[in-house]
Amino acid sequence: MTADLITGPTGGNHTVFLSGPPGAGKTTLAVRRLGYLLAQGIPAEQILILVPQRPRAAPYREALRDHAGSAVDTATVGGLARRTIELFWPLIAGPAGFAHPDRPPRFLTLETTQYYMNRIIEPFLGEGAFDGVTLPRARLVSQIVDNLDKAAAVGFPPEQIAERLKGAWSGESARRRIYDRVQAAALAFRRACLEHNLLDWSLQITVFREQLLPLPQLRRYLLSGYRHLIADNVEEEAPVTHDLLRLWLPLCESALLVYDTDGGYRVFLGADPAGALALAELCRERHSLTHSYVAPPEMEALGRGLTGRATGQADPRRAMRFEVFRYHPQMLDWVADETSRLVREEGLAPGEIAILAPFLSDALRFALGERLRRFGLAVRSHRPSRPLREEPAARCLLTLAKLAHPHWRRPPPLADVTQALSFAIAEMDPVRAHLLARIVYRVRDEQPTLTPFYHLREEMQERIG
């Protein structure tokens, strides 16, 4: 069956829906199918690799590294939206409601979107609209942007944001008023975008779905440009992508849709696994791979048990181990010891080990990181709610920049100088860093200065090391 999937017809609307668990070889087959299309003389510019996020295209880019000739396009639905909006802008700008259709569009990145949203909510904050919200301002901005993105991905207008948030909330009624203000801020941002020809991700997707998909010119453009389609991880795509595929599948020469039966992890970001599975009915062939080559039987059994469909002979309890400790430091010691054991005794790569916590405070991250470093293990933390400026490396650079430019008149706090010294100087522990900062750091007329180390008394130099 796998050979047929790779060497199937390259014309006649040969559409295939391939499903299976993680590690079953679905992407590997899709990569080989891509190689077969190119070997059959299909021009690279007629092939599109559609993925939910750009990193998912890495296996295809790796396979194409040695390919001579034109490049195969890899894109997300957001990338397609931007590309086609630029191309058809004169046709859609007016109907889409932009105030200056004669001027070119300006596309916003996530960072610039948050920048403009931050300016939009300024008057709302001044009026006390979000006084009951304890989130940091950056997090509030991110949440409002996220609401717009989800609305666009799923396909409902931003005017329904408050209604849907209220419908999902069962707590105190005061929160419901906050949702009205969130929607008001989102709509104010949308009006500003339309007024100034700005397109954030949500507006790009909205324009793509409402203005471009109905256009016959778009269908002719896609059909003439991309006659062969490979869509990987369709279960992680939003409904707007599935709408596009429904239009595309009957028109292309060949298509391979790859569906992960245990995927759909991005449901909270708008993914629609059920809508992706329904695409199978539009394909001429449907194939399923059942065996995973990367997950041991115990982990597969654990997964089935957690989803309420445990079958087979493997015992999922073998994949789990419970340890209970009375004191918090004991728990951290055990985590560090167990991580070291997995690396030293079982040969696991540190990058294959994940340590999960319901909440990652600065204290927890520091304490666990120090324990792991004693074993010579590097650690990298991920905390989406934490702004970049709060990361130690970023804070160190910002502090050093303020010290290097005293004319900015933005002296950093003593605590930030201490942290920067501890982070930037090898083997400088926090105690000595604090002592050094207290001695050498001075602020005069709002201008920070550092006393040269050689000006310190000899005994103090030796104490600091």
Image (cartoon, rainbow, N blue to C red):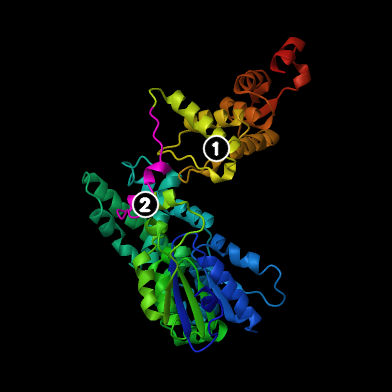
First in residue order: circle 1 vs circle 2: 2
Name the kind of residue labelled 2 in the image.
Answer: Gln
Residue 430 vs 34, above or below: the answer is: above
Q: Give how far across and how far down residue 412 sits, in percent.
A: 59, 31
Task: Give the camera-side residue of 10 and 5.
Answer: 5
Q: Give how far across and how far down residue 304 sits, in percent.
A: 35, 54
Which residue ends up furthest to the bottom in the rendered image?
Answer: 12
**Residue at position x 40%, y 22% in the image:** 327
Residue labelled with disc 1: 342
Judging from the image, what secondary structure is the residue with disc 1 in?
helix
Residue labelled with disc 2: 313
Which residue ends up furthest to the right in the rendered image?
Answer: 454
Is residue 423 located in the magenta-colored stretch of the structure? no
Q: Main secondary structure of the magenta part?
A: loop
Name the kind of residue labelled 1 in the image.
Answer: Leu
Residue 303 vs 328, above or below: the answer is: below
Task: Give the camera-side residue of 86 and 422.
Answer: 422
Quadrant for residue 436, please give it. top right
- Within 10 Å of disc 1 (Cα), the crowding (few <14, some 14-19, many 20+) is some
Judging from the image, what secondary structure is the residue with disc 2 in?
loop
Quadrant for residue 457, please give it. top right
Looking at the rendering, the stretch of residues picked out in magenta corresponds to 304-324
